[in-house]
Image: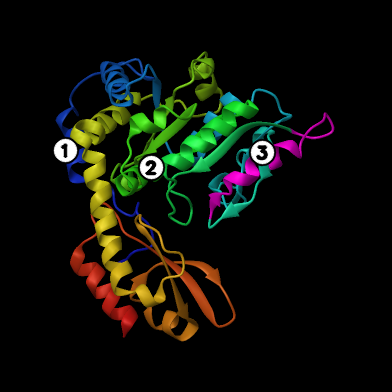
Amino acid sequence: MINLKNDYNTVGDKKILEELIKYSDERYVGYGEDTKSKELNSLVNNICNKDVDSYVLAGGTITNVIGLNQMLKYSYEAVITVQSSHINVHETAALEATGHKIIYTPNILGKLDISKIEETYNNFTDNHMAMPKALYLANATELGEVYTLAELREISAICKKLGLYFFIDGARLPQALASAGYSLADIAGLCDMFYLGGTKLGLPYGELLIIVNDELKANFKYLIKNKLGMLAKGFVGAIMFNAFLKDDYYLELANHSISMANIIRDELKDYLIYPNTTNQVFIKLDNNKYNNIKDKVACEIWESHNDYKVIRLVTAFNTKKEDVLEAIKIIKS
């Protein structure tokens, strides 16, 4: 079976694994106090062109929960986001389990409707309601959409005006950067906290959380430990991300995944339902056609309707062109 169900279905990129083997006999202190973690933080500072703090956490959900909890100090403080966001739909109420409400704001194909942010904020105005304190978005979104740099600048300005912290979920940020052409330095100049995803782009595990706003840096390690996110072998994640970031290797991996997705988009343009420019492709298939391919091409059902399904095909850092062409052939037949 050709696996296009997600972009985290193999152990990891060989270059990253070789880097781990290279240092496998070295000895390090634990909990992020090692030389590799310090080297990583210095590298991230250079890339972002800012004095930032960086931490490797295990996965996206725990990164979102810990990062947002640093912003939302009190249980009455809430985060604004779109209803389809990962923290609302696919994280089993993990954030809300920590006592923070999620406030929905209108969206356009999964992206924030920027014109409605301030209106949403103003709907929560007194002490009988939760207090909006942060704004969350994913870049790329759940539908593979990417925010333009102009859009991010506008959102950042609105957050500053309203006194909201700005958090960017970057589980697929490398794919967004490769697609849109802006940089980590651009992102760091606009938000208070964000992360760069590794799990969905060739790392065995890991998300790199980057704290930009000095207000949010104090005592962060206490929070990581308190929220069960502290990794004893912090140096393992640091070794991986050092290799991931060096010479923009992460963009090389992202560009490959996008190039494979572009083949699918070009060949299946008549089936496209949510066009985007990253490594997720959404197509509409009638139920008969879906039943014909489901045992040959692993994919995710995104929407199920009476007479058709919307399925998601996801290409990865190591997706082979021959597999993509074969999947296209199967779907067309």
- To which residue does mark 2 refer? 173
Name the mark on residue 18.
1
Amino acid, disc 3: Glu
Task: Choose the circle earlier in sequence order: 1 or 2.
Answer: 1
Cα distance in 3D space between marks 3 and 2: 25 Å
Over which residues does the magenta segment extend?
A: 110-130
Vertical relation: 7 (above or below) 37:
below
- Say which residue appears at 74% left-offset and 37% top-offset: 122
Q: Residue at x 44, y 22 (%)?
A: 212
Residue 216 rendering spot, x and y as whole percentages:
53, 19
Determine if the magenta segment contains residue 239: no
Describe the element under mark 3 as helix, strand or loop: helix
Q: Position of residue 175 (x, y in %)?
A: 34, 47
Label 3, on which residue? 118
- The answer, for residue 294, to whether it is visible in the render is no
Q: Earlier in the sequence, mark 1 or mark 3?
A: 1
User: Which of labels 1 and 3 is toward the front?
Assistant: 3
**Figure quadrant of the N terminus:** bottom left
Give the answer, above or below, for where 6 lies relative to 14.
below
